[in-house]
Amino acid sequence: MAEGAPGSILFERGTPDSPGEALAVYRRIVDSLRGPVASAPAGEGRVRWRVDPANLGLLSRAVGELRERGGGGTAKLEVQLLAEDLADDDTRIPNEGFMVPTLRRLREREGEGPELSLSLSVGRPYRLPPPALDLSTNDLCGLRCNMCGNRASRRDPMSMSPDDIRTLIREAAEWGIPRVSLTGAGEPLRDPGMQGYIALVNELGMLATITSNGFPISERVADELAARELSVSISIHGVTEATHDAIVGIPTAGEHAWRAIRRLVAARRRARATAGPGKLSINVSTVIQRANVHEIAALVRRARDLGADGVNIQPINLQHGHVRGEAIVRRDDVLLGASLLPSPEQRERLGRLFEELISLRRELGKFLHASEDRIELMRRYFVDSSREAMGLSCQVGERFLAVDHRGKIKPCYRLPWSVGDARISGIQRVWNSAAYGRIRRQIDSCPLTCLNNCFFRKGTS
């Protein structure tokens, strides 16, 4: 079958060694896709392209020409990557890391045409690497937050070693992941190796993010963080120290958290004055619950006045998933919800809060990370958080990947399973495996509506 004929796969046997031959094939295909093809017979106007490093530039050029010449709106291009299933949870894709940046760029501009799909030669869809790796290095935490069950005061002896963590950071960079979140069940800065991990993430060209309770951030630590390309979020749940202390169960926690913001802002100012290399983003993360409904709007303004770059708000999440057969069953912590969810008597105050947040979003723009649509979703969440009422389906199977402090690969922290040990399998070869594909199908019908900082899309499936 001639290359480019209906039903064939372009470059299936590899890219010709002769540049002229490859270019001739490319030119014939692009010319055939110009102009209207919406009414063409089945198979026409559609090209299957086996991408490899040798023809990746031609692929990018073809897509660009189709956009410029007006043929991109109706053309259909299936980009196929060579893959080999070595095991149910192990799929090898040669040269994937090299091709990911270009494939990601083409996918991000898909709305400009042509219609682009990504697939594997073994017959499954291809999933680009997630935008971030969530990597937990320890489970130590000195707080007793009312919405969290972590009370670890001693390091888990089953925790990953520093070498394990560095290996996973390097794998993320080679795979094409742009950001590593060094945050998990514990306080990241209680790990003595954290500054080294952040430095390694930056050295490999990735952005690092951490979420801290603020206690470990001395002036010295703040100066070290300000020298990095880093986003730091400080968890603060009340504009007043007393409210924050009550929620996290530790006296002076609020004082330390707000002081951490001031120290980070001052450290960044010093770094900029000396033309330092750092790019530090300083944010506040907060969770709406019964004890702080009346303080959230003021918290946003206090964070702005102190010089923070933004505030992330999410509703309290007491949902958990249980697997029964092939289905995910939702189980809410009803007992905890009875004391932490906003009470019926707070309904009017809660409504005013969301109106205040919408006004703040219009006034402050992206300083308040939640868009108006997301704020409206949070409003609905506190009325009826069912998937049907929310009109959401989860995208965590495509845009989130976590490794906990024991090395377990976690598709979602709200669900009870893991997909192997990252210390043994790594992360890249699991992501597009048949096993992970089955997990994605389960997640597609997951009844949880967490509204966490994972990723979701509108519309149930």
Image (cartoon, helix red, strand yellow):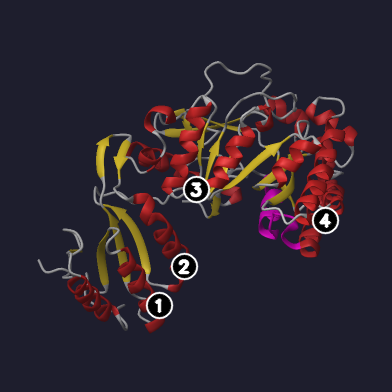
Sooner in the amino-acid sequence: mark 1 or mark 4? 1
Q: Which of marks 2 and 4 is nearer the N terminus?
A: 2
What residue sits right under mark 3 in the picture?
399
Q: How far apart are marks 2 and 1 (CA)?
A: 10 Å
Local packing at callout 3 (Cα closer than 10 Å; few below 14, some 14-19, many 20+) is: some
Report the residue marked by disc 4.
356
| Left or right of residue 126: residue 45 | left
Query: Which numbered disc, 2 or 4, marks the residue closer to the eye?
Result: 2
- Give the amino acid at mark 4: Glu
What is the magenta range?
365-381
Q: Which amino acid does label 1 sit on?
A: Arg
State yes or no: discs 4 and 3 in contact (Cβ < 8 Å): no
State the CA–CA distance, disc 3 to disc 2.
17 Å
Determine crowd level at label 2: few under 14, some 14-19, many 20+ residues with C-alpha closer than 10 A: few
x then y, percent, for residue 5: 16, 70
Rendered image quadrant of residue 64: bottom left
Residue at screen point 51% across, 24% down: 161
Q: Earlier in the sequence, mark 3 or mark 2?
A: 2
Q: Which of 41 and 200 is in front in this view?
A: 200
Q: Position of residue 207 (x, y in %)?
A: 58, 49
